[in-house]
Structure formats: C-alpha cells, structure tokens
Image (cartoon, coloured by chain):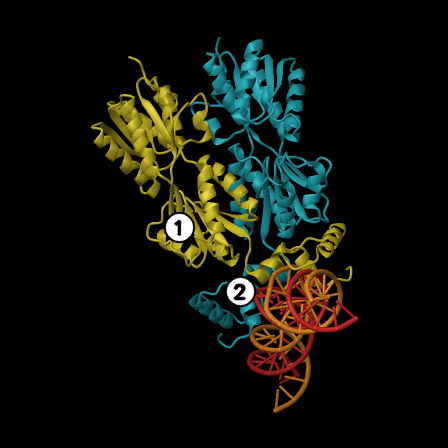
Chain colours: A cyan, B yellow, C red, D orange
Amino acid sequence: MLGVSQSAVSRAFTPGASIAPELREKIVRFAEDVDYHPNAIASMLSKSRTNIVGIVISDMQNPFYPALIEQLSRALQRIGLQSLMFNITKGTNLEEQLSALRRYNVDAVIIISATILSGPTLRWATEGRAAILINRVAEDTELSCVICDNAEGARAIADHFHAIGRRRVAYVAGLSHTTTNRERQNAFITRVAEHGMTLSALIDGNEYSYYAGRTAAFDILARGETDAIFFANDILAAGGLDALKERGVSVPEDIAVAGFDDISMAAWPHYDLTTFRQPIDMIVDVAVAMIENGSCAPGQRPTIRRISGELVKRGSTAIVDP
Amino acid sequence: MLGVSQSAVSRAFTPGASIAPELREKIVRFAEDVDYHPNAIASMLSKSRTNIVGIVISDMQNPFYPALIEQLSRALQRIGLQSLMFNITKGTNLEEQLSALRRYNVDAVIIISATILSGPTLRWATEGRAAILINRVAEDTELSCVICDNAEGARAIADHFHAIGRRRVAYVAGLSHTTTNRERQNAFITRVAEHGMTLSALIDGNEYSYYAGRTAAFDILARGETDAIFFANDILAAGGLDALKERGVSVPEDIAVAGFDDISMAAWPHYDLTTFRQPIDMIVDVAVAMIENGSCAPGQRPTIRRISGELVKRGSTAIVDP
DNA sequence: GCCAATCTTGCATCCGTATGCAAGGCAAGC
DNA sequence: GCTTGCCTTGCATACGGATGCAAGATTGGC
C-alpha cells in the first residue's frame, strides 16, 4: 500500500473517473511493480456488468461458422467484450448449459444458427437479457436478428442459372425445416417458376454436410433431367460437385452448380464454386453495433437486420459455348 | 422470501452442503417459481474459483482446430467448466487480451497451438495459473503440454512410403519454425535416410494453408524426381493433391501423398487422403484430466503427455500394381 | 426421561471493486 | 482576505454468495 485509499485505486483504473492525473499515474505505476491487476470478477459484481457475451454455437463442422465466430470474437474483443462459448450439440445437456448462460450474467447472448434450440427454449434462455440471433430469424420469439438476405441470394442464383441458359434446375436443402433453408428454398422455387424454368428435383439432405450433398447429387443423377443444381450451402455443394465429377459428369458443361455462403473452400481451384457470399464482416459489424448501442436489450423492440450479400460467379456456372 | 436465511439458500444450491433434504427441496422449488438463479459472479468472488477456462486460439481456418475446440469445450462443459475464448490473430491487441486472461481469473488456460505467442509472452500470460499447451511443446517455459506424437507419425508415414515402394520422397513444411513442424520434419527426414530413400525436395510452405500446399506441389513437379510427398498437415495436402491432379499427375500412381491430422476432409472420396490421425478425443481427455486433477497447477512440475496417433491408410497411397 | 452426539440453521464476516456523499484543498473573483 | 465553486480524496456501504462458528433441533442410547 502506498497510503492511498482503495477508492483511489479503483478510480485509477476506471477511465474517466474523478482522480488527479498524477495520482493515477503513481498508482498505475506502482501496480505494475507489485503486479497488481484489478479483479474483473469483483468489478462485475458491483457493476452488474460482466463484459462477457455468451456465444451459442451448434455446428463447428461447417467452415462458415468458425469463420464467423473468429470474426465475431475479434470484433467483440475490440470493444472490450469477451466471448464465453456455449457449444450446443447433440448430447450436450441443454438445460445445464442455458442455465449457465443465466448464472454467468452475460451482458448479451449471440445465438448462431442454433437450429437445435426450439422456440420456448430460446425464449427461456434469452429472457430478460440482450440477445441476437445470427443467421436465423426469430419465429415465435421476440428476438433481434442479423441475417443474410437468403431470398435475395436464392433469387440471384435462379437468375444466374437462367442467364447461363439452364432450364431444368434442382434444389438441395440442408435441414429443410430451418428458417434459413425455407427462405432460400421458397425464393428459389418461386423465381424458377417466374422464369418458366422446370424444378427437376427437390431434395432434402437432412443435414448440411458434404455427404448429404454427395448423396443428393447421386439421386439427381439417377433421375436425369437436370442441368443445374442449387445446393443450400457450400458444404453440400462441395459434396455434390465431387460426386458429379466422380460419375464423369462435367461441371458446368453438363450440370452447373451453385452453393451458398462463400466459404474459403468455394474459391479453391478444384471447386471453383459459384456461390452467394454471406458478408461476414457486415453481419458481425451489425451484430456488434446492436450490442453496443443496446438496441437488442430486453426492453427494446426487436430489430431484424437483413444484410445484402453478393453473387460470386465462378467456374461451376461458367457459360458453355455449344 | 420464505423465511429462510441467505445461508440456507446458498447451501441449497451447493452440492454436499449441510442442509436438510426437505429444506433444500423447498428452496429449489421456490427458486423455480420466482425464477431465481444463483449468481455465479458472486460465487466466484467468494470462492475465488471461476469455473472458467481460458482457451487461446489462433487459427480457426484449419478445420482441425474447430474440431478440437468443439470437443474440448464440450468436455469442459461436462465437468462444469465454461470456455472463455481468446482469439489471437494478426492484428489483435495481444497485451490487452492476455491481461484480460488474468483479470478474469480463469481457473486454467489452454493454449492451442498459439504459434504467435513467444516464450516470454507465454510465460507472462500463464504466470501463476494452471496452463496447458495443446499441440505444441513448451520450449523455454515450464508449461505442461499435451501433444500428438509427431515423430511417431512422421516415421509411420516414411515407413509407409517405403512399404509401398516409394524411394524419392518430398517433405512440405507448414510453418517451419513451429515445434510441431520441426518434430515431424526431423523424424521424417531421419527415417527416410534410414530406409535409404532419397529426400527429393524439402519445401517450406510458410503457412499451413491450402494454397501453400498447392504452390509446394507445383514446385515439386517442376523439379521432377519425386514419387511421394508428405505434407505437414492435411490442409496442405489437400491443396497439393488438387494441384497434382490439375496437372494431370495420377495419385497414387505417379506420386503418393500423405498428410497429418486426419481432418474430416481427408476421408472425403475426392481426397481419400492417407494421413496420421491425431486422436482428438484422447488429447482432450488428457488435457481435461490434467485440469481436473490439478497436475497443471502453478506449483506442480510440468507434465508432457505425448499421445499416440494412428496411421490411416487411404487411396492416396494405395499400392500400385505395375 | 435424561444426556450426548449429530444434524440443521442462522449470524456475522469476507471476497474485491464501485460509487454516493461529504470533507478537504485549491483557484478565481470581488 | 474572504467567499463561492470545482476538483480530489476518503469513508462507508453495496453487490450476492460462501463459510466458520455457535446455537438450536433432532436422534439415539441407556
């Protein structure tokens, strides 16, 4: 101790607190010497603010999510928030995890495509605290969400298929009941009809995985009659592409292929996959801004922000000269 | 309030505390009604135990890490620990992040291949707290680590190349200065020499990425004289494989290819990549056990646990009948 | 039925920081 | 030189739960 009160120390480490610059300097310097660090826990207790955001994730297998999480956690770090990770997969004790979410008094909860969480669970988990859904819209809950404009993307793909002269197109769903899939699927089918194209197949992969895409591609081949396939995301598309090539089908000559997300793999020369890019940067920025300005706080009216994406045309839908 | 003391409430939620079962029951039930949850923050403060583990990560792009992190966080959840994520990449304010690690009083720190952290930084970040390195050995620090037996894996690959009749082999490093790479590289080169095989190329990719693998493969092709390539990890190998195929090289006929990690992609039919599997389950189990039994606590002698892996033979090194 | 041992419960205090309030110090204005 | 007002600082208390200690309640043994 160097003869100052505990209050002084507290103020020395509180930006903007009422303390003389010299005293602050003196305290901070001395703290370095004795290796003192303010205890964040105690601070949380008295301020009832934790500077921790709970991030609920459910699918780390799809590279889109690690990429999103990485950016998100960095953006949060930049404004002094830490990320407490809640991994919800089959086999996790849901109730225990969500109650932890409450016990830890996180300042906000970000739920990333937690398809596993049902409406009531979601409501319970986020009750009375700031919350944002990313990549999923709230159905029967009053939650804010940030989501890519799935319909826009699906229409862009349909338009693009039409523009490159395809007329018999197929759609491969991931989990068909997810809001994400429904938006993409409905918009795609509608636009396909508007163009007078034929929907030659509509397959539910039952999961967003490479193997589901592969299986779906084989199914479509077995039926014939398809010259373009829109897979609900890039991982499905990767599996589909490989399956087509394996069967000797030329892409894009015989069948054009498109995905959704623009994961890094889509740009690999081997896949060279046309896809609709989810603007991760912007999604993250918007979500973080919502947390910062409190627009997702419990009292507020929930906001739904749809972020525009961008069609990335690559070789898998190149125009084929007959 | 239902006429009981605050102590009673505390004890009701503390397993093993001295309290009559009926009273506990009553309190817990009432708590449900009024939606009371024990405040973990307050508990941390008085117990000086946070039940939070800091996880320091630096590379979410390589699918191996998301897979590891997912398993790890689930294993921690199972024993009641939460994961606070610290994402360290180029551009993050290292000092601020690491000081957060201290302020938050995490019970333990798990550092996952933080190649970015130098020895001194590492020491400072983990000083006085339980810490484990995963997938990297401590060099000049006194830290416990859990690591796959890289040398074993590299030797297994060399042996396997030899067994399938390859004699002019190349090695492609990721980041050549990382301990992981050095172990794999040295063991591979040594064993190659022991078998009397020729090391036809030794390339440093400068990063563990698809494109680095691709570039390396082109380099090797340009030199000729190689009939098997060992890439330091699967992502490199994937890039390499695609590059070879792109140039019309047959795998495994012309050149056999092996990777390291056994990420899920390695098993995809398109890659069908021989690789050395890092036993994620076991690595996670061991790390979590070390935290649970306190063997990585500050006072203890650091433990180094090398976990045995397994060679997974796939098509990329199939035996070719002449 | 009485005493001792055990089990429950409440009281008081502590964890480390934040902050309202009041007291003291200092500068400007007359 | 005195008053007014702002700037600093310390005091006291709050945040919500954990826990040692002691008092009260219960049980068993004789």
Give the percent coordinates (x, y) of residue A321. Answer: 48, 11
Residue type for callout 1? Ser
Pick the front one: B307 or A210: B307
- Identify residue for label 1: B144
Residue that appears at 44% across and 31% down = B263
Chain under callout 2: A
In the image, residue A150 sits, relative to residue B145, either above or below, namely above
Quadrant housing residue B172 = top left
Residue type for callout 2? Phe
Residue A31 visible in the shown view = yes
Query: Tag 1's secondary structure?
Result: strand
Residue A275 visible in the shown view = no
Quadrant placement of the C terminus of chain B:
top left
Pick the front one: C26 or A189: A189
Pick the front one: A302 or B68: B68
Left/right of residue A316 with respect to residue B322 in the rendered view: right
- Identify residue for label 2: A13
Chain under callout 1: B
Pick the front one: B146 or B184: B146
